[in-house]
Amino acid sequence: MKSTITTAQFNRNTLTCKRYQPSTLPILRAGLLVAVTAIALFAAATQVHAQAIGFVWNNNPTTKGTTTPDSSYSYNSSGGAISMTRNSKGNYTVDFAGLGDSFYSDVQVNGYGPGSDFCNVAGWYSPNGTDVEIGVLCYTHAGVPADHSFTLLYQARTSTDPTTPDVAFLWANQPTASSYTPSGLYQYNVFGGTNIITRNSKGNYSATLPGFTTTGGTVIVTAYGSTPAHCQVTDWGSGGSGTVVNVNCTNTAGVATDSEFDLVYSIYETAGYGADSDAGGAIWAFNDTDKSPYDVTGTYSIGIDGIDMYAQRLGTGQYAWTMTVDDTWTSSNVLATAYGAPGNYCTTKEWLSSSTTTTVYINCFNSAGTPANTRFTATFQLAGIY
């Protein structure tokens, strides 16, 4: 579907662009609430929040100014325009016109391409209650700003929407607190429960998602903030009180560090789409050394039309995820998160589609930017299919 382009990743916390300066980014949310009080009050009074989905592939990472991303790999459920602005080296703003007020929403980002560069969410908000602006910062493996391609997924949810799938997400905004409730305006739980975060030790967190008592599902995590970091899934499990997802965050040297992050968990349907949409797939690639294709269809996957899915190791830190399909898919998006190896991170190299098969290629690295065998989770979204 897509040819290999220079890698990149997303960011939300540091909107170092036309509206915010780096010094104010760590309190973007607080500043945002002050700046758009009228919008917030209007939204709360009229209950205008609705399911909203947007994704994008930044295919022009070095082009200065504002460009229009490739429409074959971008989507806006409002039907509005999508634009990409390079503010400075490695600093981008994605704009989804008409996608809403940005409340009860989540952003995930992933580097794209063959290199070891990565990106974090820098921040997101709505300047006018109608459009959504998302900031992304990209770095070399050593944490130096770098122009890089990336994929990004935005979603907003409301419990009154009948198409809302079994999904929960949160913005972990207090990285040094021992236990807390993440920002209420930027978390969601389809069962109506309140998600909470526990800090077990430096850079080690547990997110509890009430109501999700069924074993399975998939998780995607992205580090958030102006300081480069890697956050990944350690494991997750379900019980009578819900699902607990464990997350580790490290700095670019691979040392445990306290970091904000965005997390999305989904079961039965892919994160970002409606119930019974068949609009994508998700896997946990649990074998990081097997060069033979192995079946990843099961409890910790989300299949498409009941089809089998396979993963395999192609080389050190290089993997393929293959789905057999009936039609060629366009307007698609891929995200990946490293699993169980603190300090390691994974990026999307590319994905290709024929009339019968789609193959996603994932690269994983250690903190030194060297290819490293790593288990991972990954999701594949399709546009506008509900």
Image (spheres, rainbow, N blue to C red):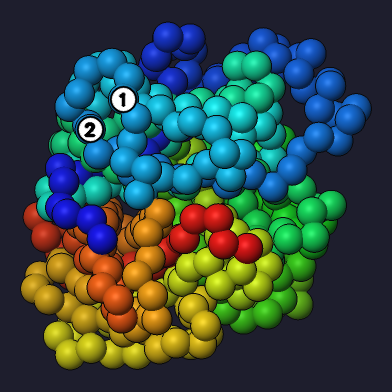
Q: Position of residue 287 (x, y in %)?
A: 28, 82
Q: Are marks 2 and 1 in contact (CB under 8 Å)?
A: yes
* x, y percent for residue 20: 47, 11
Q: In the structure shown, which secondary structural element does the residue marked by tag 2 occupy?
A: loop
- Mark pair 2, 1: CA separation: 7 Å
Q: Residue at x 76, y 38 (%)?
A: 49
Does residue 227 lie above or below 201 as drawn?
above
Vertical order, 330 against 323 (above or below): above
Residue 60's disc number: 2
Q: Which of the pair 272/69 is nearer the observer?
A: 69
Residue 385 appears left or right of 240:
left
Quadrant where the N terminus is found in the figure:
bottom left
Residue at x-position 30% and y-position 76%: 355
Q: Which amino acid lies under the numbered mark 2 shown in the image of this protein?
A: Asn
Q: Is residue 223 visible?
A: yes
Could you tell me residue 292's position as x and y percent?
A: 17, 90
Q: Nearer the viewer, residue 335 or 53?
A: 53
Label ID, residue 67:
1
